[in-house]
Every structure is written in C-alpha cells, then in structure tokens.
Amino acid sequence: MALHPQTARFLEQLAGMRALAAEPPSIEESRRVLNLEYPVERRPLPRVADLAVDGPDGPVPVRLYRPEPAGAPLPALVYLHGGGWVLGGLENVDVSCRDLAAEAGCAVLSVDYRLAPEHPFPAAVRDAWAVTEAVAADPGRFGADPARLAVGGDSAGGNLAAVVALLARDRGVDLAHQLLVYPVTDTARDTPSWRDYGSGYGLDGEEMARFMELYRAGADPADPLLAPLRAPDLSGVAPATVVTAEYDILRDEGDAYARRLAAAGVPVAHRCFPGVVHSFFLLPELFDTGAAAREWAVGRLRAAFGTRDVAPA
C-alpha cells in the first residue's frame, strides 16, 4: 500500500532534521542525540529497578520492570534494544518495556548489552545470553517463573533475541516464546527491500551497513550467531512472533526468517504491517499501526505465557 499519512509526516520531519547536519554525525554525536530526554509519558509501575547480572566479561546492567511489586512469580521477557549494535540503551526502550510489562502481565528485563565498535561481536551475544541464563538459573531474584521465560527485541535487538533462542535450544534452556520485531537476520544486504528502501525511509542502508561492519569486525558473515537466517537448522527453537514493516530495509530478511521457522516446524505467527517504516513498533504515539502491532504482540505473549487461551490470528 502507499505510505500511511502518519508515516509520510514522520519521514518529512526526519528528513528536515537530517538536512540540518552538514555531514553524517559521528557515533558519539548519534549516541548523544539518541540519549536526549524527550517529553514522553512513562507509565508508572510498582517496581522498576536497575540491577546487574554477572556476565562472562563483567557485570551486565539490566533494568527490571514488574507490574506487581511482589507475590507469585510472573512470566518474564528478556528484552534487547535496537540501535544497530552501536547505539541505544536502557532509556531508549524504557517506555516500551513499561508498556510490555503492564500489558503482557510479565516481568521485563531490559539488557544494557555492550556496544560496538568498542565491544564488537560476540560481546552483545555473550551479554544477552548471560542475562537469559541468569533468569533461568535464579528466577527468584527477579520474581520470574522459569517455565514461562521469553526473549524479545527490535532490529539489532531482534537479531540478538533470535540468536539467544538458538543458544537456548542448544544449551537446554526452555523458552516459551521469542518476539522478533523487524529483526536483522542476515549480513548479505542484497534483498529487494534493502535495494528499494535504503534511502529516505528512516533506517538508512549505508548507515546500517556501516554499523553492521563495526559490529562484525571481521567475523565470519555466515556465523549463525551473527546471521541466524544462515543457521543450518532452526528446528526446536522457541515458538515465535515476527513483526515486519512494509517500507523497511529489514523487511525481506524478517519475512524470510519467519518462513524458515515455519518450514522447520516451529510455531510462528508473522505480520508485515503495511504503509509503515522501521521503528513504528516503538512509536505507538506517532503510528496508529504501531499501537495495533503492539496490541497483537502483547496478545501473542499472553498466549505463550498461558494468561490467555488463544493467540489472536
């Protein structure tokens, strides 16, 4: 379909902001701008706590969100933010994690994994796995039910979530679900969506390619822990929800991953939301479609956690 009017307005505003920059900003400047505080309403929750999990290379900061202060263990979602493995952090998904915790009725652990280029692959994978393993091994610390543990993320975080699901299968940690929101699943960058939407649609192809190379840092581009679409076998991974956007360079590889999951016998629901661009899921205040996608994803999580009988179609 044509660009949604809300998408067109968003892209016009984004183009105006980028036109003010004479040259592409440095990583440091991009991080500074991304970390600026914007006047967005944050849902109050009974407990929001900054903690740390022991990782293989040192403490991994996490932020725990609970819609109930105490009581019976809750289902838990380990959430991994986007940003091309180079940008982003806890604050950038704080609003979304609060909403997911409240609406899905689960504890959410947002992971402040290490970023490239200071910490290239596989540092982020090691941090993401360390937190997931910690919740499975010591659920009482987080008020979590280890039998109802899921992993999720958006963009580069969706890549990490898919990778964690592969590791969980191979290392004997049972996951109830994986929520993959416009995930990076490959390193080839040769799909029609990369070709058609690499400029002017929010997520810039050249910038994303640069970030991917900073993260990869010479690693084998076919390594499944970098490109889960290239894993030889996807059978046995956690059931999945895959969200993609029509006007997104990552659309085709997300679609392809959903198809491969289904072909491997993994229960998967996939929706490509029309008329929208990358980041729409995290901006329901700007995109009505983002609110609809969030509602669908929450329903899928609730079904996976057993707090709802049937997932929405």
Image (spheres, rainbow, N blue to C red):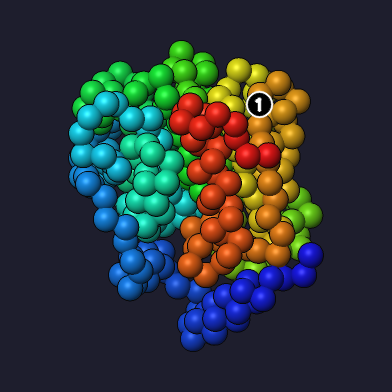
How far across and down, in percent of the image, does residue 190 sit? Answer: 74, 50
Q: Nearer the viewer, residue 310 or 48?
A: 310
How far across and down, in percent of the image, does residue 47 sit? Answer: 22, 45
Is residue 161 in view from this perspective? Answer: no
Q: In which quarter of the image is the C terminus?
A: top right
Q: Name the residue under label 1.
A: 267
The amino acid sitting under disc 1 is Pro
Q: In this view, does 238 lie above or below 298?
A: above
Residue at 50% x, 36% y is: 301
Rendering quarter of residue 270:
top right
Residue at 60% x, 79% y is: 9
How far across and down, in percent of the image, does residue 147 sit? Answer: 41, 19
Q: Is residue 4 above or below residue 159?
A: below
Q: Which of 18 and 288 is in front in this view?
A: 288
Is 261 left, or right, of 49 in this rendering? right
Residue at 59% x, 31% y is: 310
> Element under label 1?
loop
Residue at 30% x, 18% y is: 137
Q: Is residue 106 above or below residue 276?
A: above
Is residue 64 in view from this perspective? Answer: yes
Q: In which quarter of the image is the N terminus?
A: bottom right
How far across and down, in percent of the image, does residue 157 sit? Answer: 48, 45
